[in-house]
Amino acid sequence: MTMPLPYCVYILFSEKDHLLYIGFTSNIQKRIENHNAGLTKSTAWRRPLQLVFCEYYLFEPDARKREMYFKTTAGKKAIKLMLNSTLEKLDYKQSKIECLFDEE
């Protein structure tokens, strides 16, 4: 029996402003629903939001560390490299990745 990985670092694409949002959660489905329902202050005005990336981790500190990395200059560059084709197709505004800090 395999144990599911409970922690997720995710990236959302805003269809309104064409920018990205980086976050962390232990329930990705509920978190996306909350974002798109306007229940997350930092993204409420940026809806609709589309999940474009997620990574799962067994332990919370590892997921938090990865989230913080993605919010650094080097992490933003890594995101652009990893998601280059996706970002091009979505007409991503290359100038900025939104990195607001939210608590669930």
Image (cartoon, grey):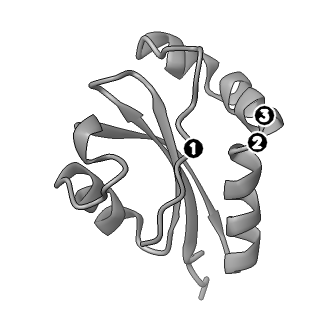
Q: Nearer the viewer, residue 93 or 7?
A: 93
- Label 2 Cα neighbours within 10 Å, binned few <14 / some 14-19 / many ≥20: few
Q: Is residue 50 above or below residue 80?
A: below
Residue underneath mark 2: 72
Find out whether the residues at labels 2 and 3 contact each other: C-beta distance under 8 Å.
Answer: yes
Q: Which mark is residue 8?
A: none
Q: Using the numbered discs, state the Cα–Cα distance from disc 1 to disc 3 in whole angstroms.
A: 11 Å
Badge 3 element? helix
The quadrant of the rendering that contains the N terminus is bottom right
CA–CA distance in space, label 1 to label 2: 9 Å
Comparing 8 with 72, the one in front is: 72
- For residue 30, side relative to residue 100 (left or right): left
Q: Is residue 43 left or right of residue 4?
A: left
Q: Quadrant of residue 33?
A: bottom left
Q: Are marks 1 and 3 in contact (CB under 8 Å)?
A: no
At 29% from the left and 26% from the top, the residue drawn is: 15
In the displayed structure, 17 sits above or below 69; it is above
Amino acid tagged 3: Thr
Distance from disc 2 to disc 3, alpha carbons, whole Å, reads 4 Å
In this view, which residue lies farthest toward the left?
37
Residue 54 placed where, x, y %?
Answer: 55, 51
Q: Amino acid at mark 2?
A: Thr
- Considering only order in the chain, which callout, 3 or 1, is on the residue closer to the N terminus? 3
Question: Which of the two labelled residues, at mark 1 and mark 2, occupies the earlier sequence position?
Answer: 2
Residue 55 spot, x, y in % from top left: 62, 55
Residue bearing the label numbered 3: 73
Amino acid marked by disc 1: Cys
Structural crowding at the residue carrying mark 1, measured as other residues with C-alpha within 10 Å and reported as few (<14), some (14–19) or many (≥20) = some
Q: Position of residue 19 (x, y in %)?
A: 45, 27
